[in-house]
Amino acid sequence: MNTHLIELLKRSLTGLVLIVSFGGAYLHSSLLFIAALLVLLCITLCWEWPRLVNLHKNSRMALTIMYPIVPFATLMWLTHEFYSTDFYLPIFPFLTAWAADTGGYIVGKLIGFHKMCPTISPGKSWEGFTGSIISVFGMCWHVLPKIELFKPTILVTNLIALFFFALLITTIAFLGGFFLSVLKRKEGLKDAGSLLPGHGGILDRFDGVLFVGLTTALLTVIFR
């Protein structure tokens, strides 16, 4: 079987398991979802993060607090704060960041000829980035009208404003991936871990989610 097809199958199956697991946890209760995020943070800190940074340096310890602890804590806070009042808001970072990953991966594999930053992240292309924008735009167009925080804003009534918002979210998700790529390249690593077949580690799958989560928390301050 073709290597690319095997990789796609592994990536798709792992993605399906993640969606079912996280979707089920979120639908069950906010407490279970927060517990799942806490478990992922512990796995990241114990197994993946030490491969990326030297924790014996004070500067690295400070980085550990800023990333990944603060972003994961932000996702937990969003769930605790808005789960009962604005159901779709806490999962907005997951929906949009994973939409960006999926759209970028598919389009990039099909027609990704112009690389964005080949020395840092050779898999990312401008064509893939465009696919990410389209995917995030579609996700935002579908989800934003269901989020109470965004209902009063121009984002749910003006397609141009929605497009630029999707561009912003896509760029932030990309920066999350770029930041992790820099850390991996410094240590000569392809992936942060191997827990998720076809994706790598926890951080490889959640890099964009963590950055979009921080942005979502900032938006709650701006729009509330």
Image: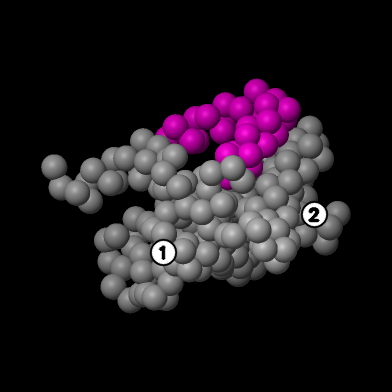
Q: Is residue 34 magenta?
A: yes
Residue 203: x and y, percent? 53, 50
Identity of the residue drawn at 22% across and 46% down: 5
Q: CA distance from mark 1 to mark 2?
A: 38 Å
Q: What secondary structure prevails in the magenta region?
A: helix
Q: As displayed, is residue 99 above or below residue 129? A: above
Q: Nearer the viewer, residue 159 or 84?
A: 84
Q: CB of mark 1 within 8 Å of CB of mark 2?
A: no
Q: Quadrant of the C terminus?
A: bottom right
Looking at the image, the residue that sits furthest to the left is 1
Q: Nearer the viewer, residue 65 or 11?
A: 65
Residue 124 appears in the picture as rendered: no
Amino acid type indicated by mark 1: Gly
Q: Earlier in the sequence, mark 1 or mark 2?
A: 1
Amino acid type indicated by mark 2: Thr
Q: As displayed, is residue 99 above or below residue 63? A: above
Q: Quadrant of the N terminus?
A: top left
Q: Which residue is mark 2?
A: 220
Q: As displayed, is residue 22 above or below residue 223? A: above
Range covered by the magenta-colored residues: 16-44
Badge number at residue 188? 1
* Quadrant of the image occupied by residue 83: top right
* Quadrant of the image occupied by residue 110: bottom left
